[in-house]
Image: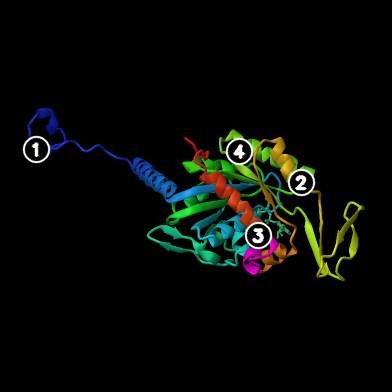
Amino acid sequence: MADSPVSHHQGTSEQKPEKPEVSSEQKVQMEQAYQQMQRKIRINKLDEDIKHKIMVLSGKGGVGKSTVATGLALSLARMGKKVGIMDIDITGPNVPKMLGLEGTDLHVENGRIHPAIGAHGIKVISMAFLIEDPDKPVIWRGPIKLGAINQFIGDVEWGELDALIIDFPPGTSDEPLTVSQSLPTIDGVVIVTTPQEVALLDSRKSINFAKTISIPVIGVVENMSGYTLTGSTEPNIKLGINGPSGSMIETTSDSEGNWSITLDVFKSGGGADAAENLSVPFLGSLPFDPGIVRGGDDGVHRIIADPSGATAQAFDKIVEKVIETLEKPSSPTVRIS
Ligand SMILES: Nc1ncnc2c1ncn2[C@@H]1O[C@H](COP(=O)(O)OP(=O)(O)OP(=O)(O)O)[C@@H](O)[C@H]1O
Ligand SMILES: [Mg+2]
């Protein structure tokens, strides 16, 4: 009688509470809610474990976001910082290729994804690791893309990091929005541009996008800003080269006969002008460097191939400015609800 499903109507103290009937659909919903809660807890923990999160955006494709994202990561790492890089570009993920990690199989343990480890110990997660045939286009619709991004954020074992750099596809698409909604705090956005007017116009869109989603703009990086030619001749000789705009560029060799001339392949100073117009900081310029293209193809980043070269030095200067901004007591980390 005590076990009767109606025993509670009789008011005895020994009765067991009636168990509510749970349908299999409700069970699935409860399981999903539990998983989501667990992921949320992990994301909050990840937010605490990773000191700074930096998004790299550009309005236009091919201006060098992935080059800048990998360069920032390597430059920070060789300064002794613990760094991760998350490549959110689903249709064209090329961070692993740039870091010589193409074809890496990710290690999964207890449902947690362990990032691949690149030069200077940087931790790398990319959609490229999940794509079986790199020649097949990836066509993922909104919700699947969103799920994959959330998994990247919530299910990866990043450990403690000083900085996580997040690389995106071009434009102000779903991806940065999803990341900004999933990660509780983001320090800011680095916007990459080239000196051409059209790229600059597009970067204005990125700046406005960052403002719309209330994430601070750390600053603008001007990529491919000038190509430096060097050579040697007799000491103190005047040389002239026909510049890209048709005007003569002159220089004089030094007392040892060395000379250098920087050609503004596109145009100079565009990034700095755009930053000033839009009242955001200018972080610096990166030279046009054919070694970057070679490095991208053979998987040895320019910073690794030529650690004291002009490109590596330019990255270090940009990183110093980024660190300065992030470590300011008034650093504008934004909490997104
Ligand atoms: N400073 C530079 N000097 C010379 N080549 C460069 C420089 N920066 C980038 N490149 C080259 O330009 C191409 C595009 O660069 P990258 O892939 O970094 O751009 P992206 O903005 O990430 O492109 P996407 O929009 O397709 O993601 C690559 O071949 C890269 O090697
Ligand atoms: Mg890219």
In depth, the one of 38 and 124 nearer the eye is 124
Left/right of residue 178 with respect to residue 262 in the rendered view:
left
Instruction: Name the amino acid type tagged 2.
Output: Gly
Label 2 secondary element: loop
Q: Earlier in the sequence, mark 1 or mark 2?
A: 1
Report if the CB atoms under discs 3 and 1 are less than 8 Å apart: no
Q: CA distance from mark 3 to mark 2?
A: 19 Å
Q: Which mark is residue 2?
A: 1
Q: Which mark is residue 210?
A: 4
How many residues crowd mark 2 within 10 Å: few (<14), some (14–19), many (20+)?
some
Q: CA distance from mark 1 to mark 2?
A: 85 Å
Q: Which residue is mark 2?
A: 269
Q: Earlier in the sequence, mark 3 or mark 1?
A: 1
Left/right of residue 44 with respect to residue 207 in the rendered view:
left
Instruction: Tell us which disc is closer to us: 3 or 1.
Output: 3
Figure quadrant of residue 300: bottom right
Q: Which mark is residue 313?
A: 3
In depth, the one of 233 and 204 nearer the eye is 233
Figure quadrant of residue 209: top right
Q: Earlier in the sequence, mark 2 or mark 4?
A: 4
Q: Earlier in the sequence, mark 1 or mark 4?
A: 1
Instruction: Name the amino acid type tagged 1.
Output: Ala
Beta carbon of the mark 4 residue lies under 8 A of ligand 1: no
Q: Position of residue 121 (x, y in %)?
A: 50, 64
Task: Specify the quadrant that holds the N terminus.
Answer: top left
Q: Earlier in the sequence, mark 3 or mark 4?
A: 4
Which portion, as a residue range, is magenta? 299-310
Label 4 secondary element: helix
Q: CA distance from mark 1 to mark 4?
A: 64 Å
Instruction: Tell us which disc is closer to us: 1 or 2.
Output: 2
Instruction: Name the amino acid type tagged 3.
Output: Gln
Q: Relative to 34, does residue 67 appear above or below in the rendering?
A: below
